[in-house]
Image (tube, grey):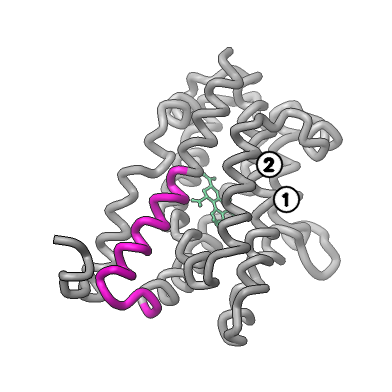
Amino acid sequence: MNAADLPPWSRAEFEHQLRTQGKNYHIHHPFNVRLNSGQCSPAQIRGWVANRFYYQSIIPLKDGAILSNCTDRETRRRWIARILDHDGYDDYQGDAAGGMEAWTQLALAVGLSRDELWSLEHVLPGVRFCCDAYVNFARRAPWQEGICSSLTEMFAPQIHKQRLAGWPEHYPWIEASGLRYFRSRIPLAQRDVDHGLEVTLDHFRDRTQQQRAVDILQFKLDILWSMLDAIEKGNPT
Ligand code: AHQ
């Protein structure tokens, strides 16, 4: 029997179906398990930081693409905060410098230079491919589908907390100031998910549309998983 013949999930059941996709989140990827249990070398950590910077750098492009498709002013008024979170705002000092600056502090703390990081010279083909697929999806999909794809962040607070709990013990050579990005994302991820989930649960109504939302979430989970596949292969020691 296909989805079109089935009744829609209740709102609570729909959210539950989305949240059970967490079993496929990249917190369970073998490279992340090694990274967060202290089994990665400094070179592997630098490789991860340099490649994940490309992901961070495309988030404002992805969110700008969603905004450019979004016809609803209320949604745009809330969504635009995501761009400022990453690019910074006001005087661009301290926390107002934005997430890409905080990620640069992480890079400096693990032994990369600012120029090396921002040159993108270490970004692997598979990572670039995954990130560009995310931006291209946001450009061409309806804005509600773009918003749905951000819901992998339902699972992000756990992975940030895992890093904050484990890295100081496992990697004492990494300055604590480098971990500020992870700490900053925990409240922001919760705010993002509250909004993203509201839009998703409101928009995808019948069972076919609800299944589409689950499939979009799986597409984004595959992006995050495949990035770690590439990083794991590209940084063997
Ligand atoms: O630092 C991350 C971030 O700013 C975002 C934005 C959001 C999106 O719009 O897709 N997803 C996301 C994520 C961030 N960090 C990842 C990590 O593992 O540190 C997790 C990732 C996500 O879960 O989607």
* Residue 57 in sight in this render: yes
Q: Position of residue 204 (x, y in %)?
A: 36, 74
Marker disc for residue 100:
1
* Residue at disc 2, CB closer than 8 Å to ligand 1: no
Residue 218 is inside the magenta segment: yes
Rendered position, 180 above or below 44: below
- Residue 108 falls left or right of residue 186: right
Residue at mark 1 to residue at mark 2: CA–CA distance: 8 Å
Neighbour class for label 1 at 10 Å: few (<14), some, many (≥20)? Answer: many
The answer to the question of whether label 1 and label 2 lie on touching residues, with beta carbons closer than 8 A, is yes
Foreground disc of the pair 1, 2? 2
Ligand 1 under 8 Å from disc 1 Cβ: no
Dot placed on the residue nearer the N-terminal end, 1 or 2: 2
Q: Amino acid at mark 1?
A: Met
Which sits in the foreground, 61 or 69? 69
Note whether residue 184 is visible: no
Is 214 above or below relative to 108? below
Mark 2 lies on residue: 53
Label 2 is placed on what type of residue?
Phe
Q: Which residues are magenta?
A: 202-222
Where disc 1 sits, the SS reads helix
Magenta-drawn stretch, dominant element (helix, strand or loop): helix
Q: Is residue 15 left or right of residue 217?
A: left
As for residue 66 lying within the magenta part, the answer is no
**199 or 4, which is in the foreground?**
4
Say which element carries label 2.
Answer: helix
Give the residue drawn at x 50%, y 44%: 223
